Image: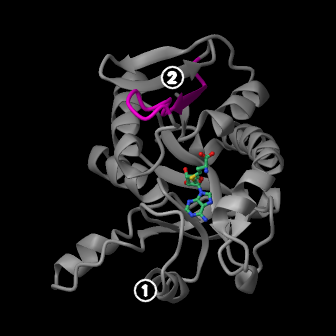
Amino acid sequence: MTILLVIAMEAEAAPVRAALGLEGPGQQLHLAFPAHLWATPDEEVAVASNGTDARFGVAAIATQPAVTTTLHAIEACAPRLVISAGTAGGFASRGGEIAKPYLASRVVFHDRRIDLPPFDRYGDGDYAVADLSAVATSMGLATGTVSTGNALDAPPSDVAKMGATETVAKDMEAAAVAWTCEQLDVPFTALKVITDLVDHHETAADQFTRNLALATKTLAQTAADLVAALQDNPLLATK
Ligand code: SAH
């Protein structure tokens, strides 16, 4: 059964597909959405990429495409595990470095501020994450909280929230992918590689642009290693 990687930007997905030996134009998942799916002939591994927003002409990042792509890709390939793979902001104060990969141990939202219990907990999400700590240890992969929001910057309230959850990777998709997986009862994790440091004087955008190529190279290699480790792992052979 398939391990499915869901990736936001084509700049992230192309190197991952190359490392996994996935070629060709892929299959469009739904006529109304730009996302495409690639799978190996044995259907052991698949990659879904959000594609380019038809109106704005940019990579379809952030939470809405993350949900639709994940839903349509799960319907297409019935995966045993979904991995939200991509880049993220890191935190030097918590050991973060440019191009460092992290596997999720927890996935939350940091910008759904709904100060009206019990909607506060609904907003934060805190979705189910597959326990892959043994695989992470064997690969020497760091683990930690991945926190998602719909902004590239980080205002003080978001920074405080990410401090409280000891976030190591700040992205714009993982929790949305995780929510979709939780609805469909599909195991989920996230693999994120750091392109920029949130606690750095430079803007995330400047750091992101400079470090994207290096980070996606690490993402491709680590994703291939992780998929190989999961395929070899008898504990994870069935759902
Ligand atoms: N300027 C870029 C846009 C990248 S947006 C461009 O057009 O090429 C950031 C993307 O990378 C999102 O998909 C998000 O998941 C991830 N990401 C990397 N660093 C991030 C950060 N500091 N905060 C939030 N998301 C980040």
Closer to the chain start, of discs 2 and 1, is 2
Query: Looking at the image, can residue 207 be seen?
Result: yes
How far across and how far down the image is residue 39, in percent?
A: 58, 19
Q: Is residue 171 left or right of residue 219?
A: left
Query: Depth check: 70 or 204 in front?
Result: 204
Residue picked out by circle 2: 37
How far across and how far down the image is residue 83, in percent?
A: 55, 46
Labels 2, 1: front one: 1
Considering the numbered disc 1 on the image, is that residue within a helix, a strand or a loop?
A: helix
Q: Is residue 50 left or right of residue 167?
A: left
Q: Amino acid at mark 1?
A: Ser
Residue picked out by circle 1: 157
Query: In the figure, residue 67 lies in which quadrant?
Result: top left
Does residue 167 lie above or below 43 as drawn?
A: below
The verdict on residue 45 being magenta is: yes
Query: Depth check: 180 or 212 in front?
Result: 212
Query: In the figure, residue 54 lies in which quadrant?
Result: top left
Does residue 111 lie above or below 35 as drawn?
A: below
